[in-house]
Image (tube, helix red, strand yellow):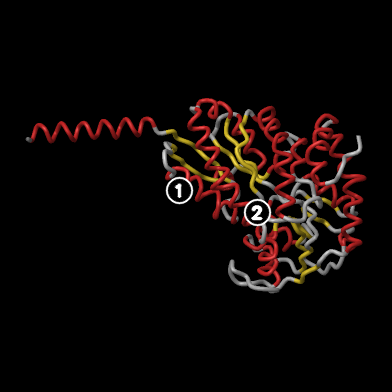
Amino acid sequence: MKIIRNALLAGTALIAGAAMAQAEELSVVGSWSSLPLYKQYEAPFWTETLPGAEGSDFEVSMTTFDQMGIAGGDVYRMLGDGVFDVGMTVADYTVGDAPELEGLDVPLVATTADDARKMVDAARPMVEDIMKERFNAKLLAIAPYPPQVVFCKDEVSSLDDLKGKKIRGSGRMTTKLLEALGAEGINVAFSEVPGALERGGVDCAVTGAGSGYSAGWWEVSSHLMTLPLGGWDPVVTAMNMDKWESLSDEQKEMLQTQLTEKFEAPAWDAAAGALESDIACLTGNGECAAGEAASMTLVEPTEADTQQARKILEETVLPEWAERAGSDWAKRWNESVGKTVGVQVPL
């Protein structure tokens, strides 16, 4: 009996070892570790949902780019080089390597989560090609931050009040729009904004309302302008193309289905009511479910503000982007995103 028991134990150990050997290991780098998108969606999906899904053989080790001490703009470049298997970062961070990727997040053209999702869906084929050609990567998902709004340390009441101010934009196209409004665009990393506002390095800064609340921007600013000057700052999730091609067809289908249904869809669903809730947390105008409400002054855009910003977008910002990205990409944008949002880049 002792011999039989030992043989069974040895056989069990061999089977367990074989199962572990067959597990597909993924090294994953998420976006900002301090923000809700990572805490509520990225981390739970990669560390719990995917490994625990029926039929899953994925084992995940996860960190974030800020925890690694690398810049958000380096994520896709390192991903393409095979430093890790899956990477997530704000698409706007990487437009120095791929200016055509700016077309994913155009300011002012999508003022609701539903419109933003339609814009992203229209851009998806473009983004897939950009990730493959520029970064040797397979597009897996695109998830939103909340609409990008403007935090200012001093009183503002309209777009005209931004003239002459030093403002941190959330992306290149946003910065170009601010400069066309008469502001001075300042390049400051997200994590450094509170210090820059406090010291006077910048007068205002653009980010998502929820992100600004989570990062404490309300502690060093007084006025919140809700005109969406920075779009939705989508975060693109991608996998190193060599790693993707090494997966079986079953693994690819399972991974993509899980991402679409259990990560991307919930993140977009939550974005629908996020702005109203985030404004309540920043201003105290309404109930704040995320914690203690701040008391910023809410500055809602006038019709004149909206028309002025839209005019600058169409006549200055988009044509400048077309020059950076190239006419072929601008044409593709017109035929997809532009048609969806009712805007055309002059060619």
Where is residue 38? Give x, y as percent.
57, 51
The location of residue 161, given as percent across then percent down, is: 88, 63
Numbered disc total = 2
> Foreground residue, 41 or 99?
41
- Res. 47 visible in picture: yes
Q: Amino acid at mark 1?
A: Glu
Q: Nearer the viewer, residue 10 or 64?
A: 10
The answer to which of marks 1 and 2 sits earlier in the sequence is: 1
Residue 48 marker: 1
In the visual, does 202 lie left or right of 163? left
**Residue for badge 2:** 191
**For the point 47% across and 46% down, which residue is it?**
47
Q: Quadrant of residue 340?
A: top right
Mark 1, other Cα within 10 Å: few <14 / some 14–19 / many ≥20: few
* Viewer can see residue 71: no
Q: Position of residue 96 (x, y in %)?
A: 74, 37
Q: What secondary structure is found at the residue carrying circle 1?
A: helix
Image quadrant for the N terminus?
Answer: top left
Real-space Cα separation, disc 1 to disc 2, in angstroms: 27 Å
Which callout, 1 or 2, points to the residue nearer the camera? 1
Is 316 drawn above or below residue 332 in the view shown? below
- Looking at the image, is 253 positioned above or below residue 221? above
Query: Label 2 amino acid?
Result: Ser
10 Å crowding of disc 2: few (<14), some (14-19), many (20+) = few
